Image: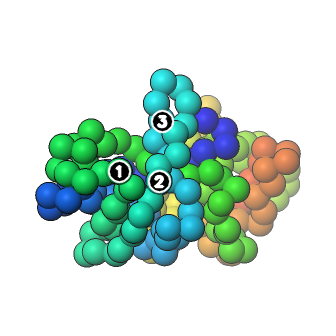
Amino acid sequence: MKGYISVGEFVKPHGINGELLFIPYNPGTEAFSSDVPLFIQKNNAYERLEVEKIRPVNKGFLIKLFDFHSIDDALSLKKKQIFIKKNDITLDKNEYLISDLINLNCYNRKNKNIGTVTEVYQGDTDIIEIKSTEGTYLIPMTDENIISVDYNNNKVVVKNEENYKI
């Protein structure tokens, strides 16, 4: 699954004409349009969905697929995860994909390994959980605490970690 990332799921059909209610995992996203190819996973492969129309609604998006004309068509995708290709995502500076942060080694500014990123808690300020044999840290992902994220070397460098040890 390296080149794809799960971005949400079809939770239920909407109406009788084959539309589906899609709820993204990131509710604030503006990334969905008919220009971004959507995929479902079938038999360990990814199958592209042919999107006719996407429109925003309160909790997510209503998606109409080509060749889906009834509620029965839509029911076949109920509770299915939806994927996009990672290279279709444009991230701003200091934006990261949660899946890319998990399992990064974490170092302090003295280059001491203080553990591994095990979880990211989303909120107004995301928080990374770092676990090691010495304990657990819950560090807010702010400029005051994160020095760098280096995917090539599989590491994140933090400061002020002593303030966030639990």
Question: Mark 2 is on which residue type?
Answer: Glu
Look at mark 3 in the image and give the residue it sits on.
41
Q: Residues within 10 Å of mark 3 (few under 14, many from 20)?
A: some
Q: Nearer the viewer, mark 2 or mark 3?
A: 2
CA distance separating discs 2 and 3:
14 Å
**Proximity of marks 2 and 1: CB atoms separated by less than 8 Å:** yes
Given the current orientation, which residue lies at the most extreme left position? 16
Give the residue at x 14% y 58%.
16
* Left or right: 154, with 2 as reference point: right
Q: Residues within 10 Å of mark 1 (few under 14, many from 20)?
A: few
Where residue 64 sits: x, y (%)?
A: 34, 61
In the displayed structure, 85 sits above or below 59; it is above
In the rendered image, which quarter contains the N terminus?
top right
Name the residue that disc number 2 marks: 50
Secondary structure, mark 2, is loop
Q: From the viewer's perspective, is 143 left or right of 74?
A: right
Reply above or below: 140 against 120: below
Q: Which secondary structure, mark 3? A: strand
Towards the viewer: 73 or 100: 73
Q: Decide if residue 92 is on the left or right side of residue 152.
A: left
Q: Secondary structure at mark 1?
A: loop
Q: Position of residue 131 (x, y in %)?
A: 58, 40
Q: Find residue 62 and report its image quarter.
A: bottom left
Residue 23 makes an appearance in the image:
no
Kindly identify the amino acid type of the residue bearing the numbered disc 1.
Asp
Residue that appears at 48% across and 24% down: 43
Sequence-first tag of 3 and 1: 3
The mark found on residue 67 in the picture is 1
Give coordinates of residue 3: x percent, y percent: 67, 43
